[in-house]
Image: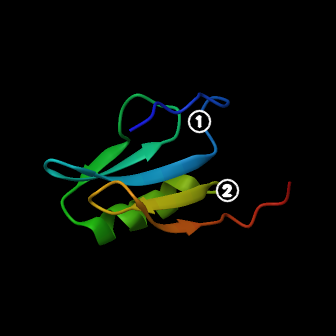
Amino acid sequence: MAIAKKTGSAGKRVHVISREKGWAVKSEGTARAYRIYSRKDAAVKGARKLSKARDVVVHRRDGSIQKWEKSGRKK
């Protein structure tokens, strides 16, 4: 997995990624996960709450993108 370039303090996207012991919610550009969940659906809900005006990118176990939810914010 490539290291994301830091863009601002919190990044522009929130990712749901597979971990050894569950699913992690991680803001783009940060080193650590916000939280680890045991179930993917719970991680997606948590990411939506955390994201506010940011995109949520949901990954499959293999790292590929399953779904990219745009935030709907105006640029």
User: Residue 16 appears at what percent x and percent y?
Assistant: 39, 55
Mark 1, other Cα within 10 Å: few <14 / some 14–19 / many ≥20: some
Mark 2, other Cα within 10 Å: few <14 / some 14–19 / many ≥20: some
Q: Quadrant of the N terminus?
A: top left
Circle 1/circle 2 CB separation < 8 Å: no
Q: Residue furthest right?
A: 75
What residue type is disc 1 on?
Ala
Counting residues from the start of the chain, the first of labels 1 and 2 encountered is 1
User: Residue 55 appears at what percent x and percent y?
Assistant: 61, 58
The dot on residue 53 is 2
Res 23 → quadrant: bottom left
Q: Nearer the viewer, residue 12 or 35?
A: 12
User: Residue 41 appears at what percent x and percent y?
Assistant: 31, 71
What residue type is disc 2 on?
Ala
Image height check: is 66 above or below 6?
Answer: below
Judge from the rendering whether residue 69 lies leftward or rightward of residue 16; answer left or right: right
Q: Nearer the viewer, residue 18 or 37?
A: 18
**Mark 2 secondary-structure assignment:** loop
Q: Which residue lies under the disc numbered 1?
A: 10
Q: Residue at x 67, y 30 (%)?
A: 8
Res 33 → quadrant: top left
Q: Residue at x 55, y 65 (%)?
A: 68
State the CA–CA distance, disc 1 to disc 2.
Answer: 11 Å
Judge from the rendering whether residue 69 lies leftward or rightward of residue 42; answer left or right: right
Q: Nearer the viewer, residue 34 or 63?
A: 63
Q: Residue at x 86, y 54 (%)?
A: 75
Res 70 → quadrant: bottom right
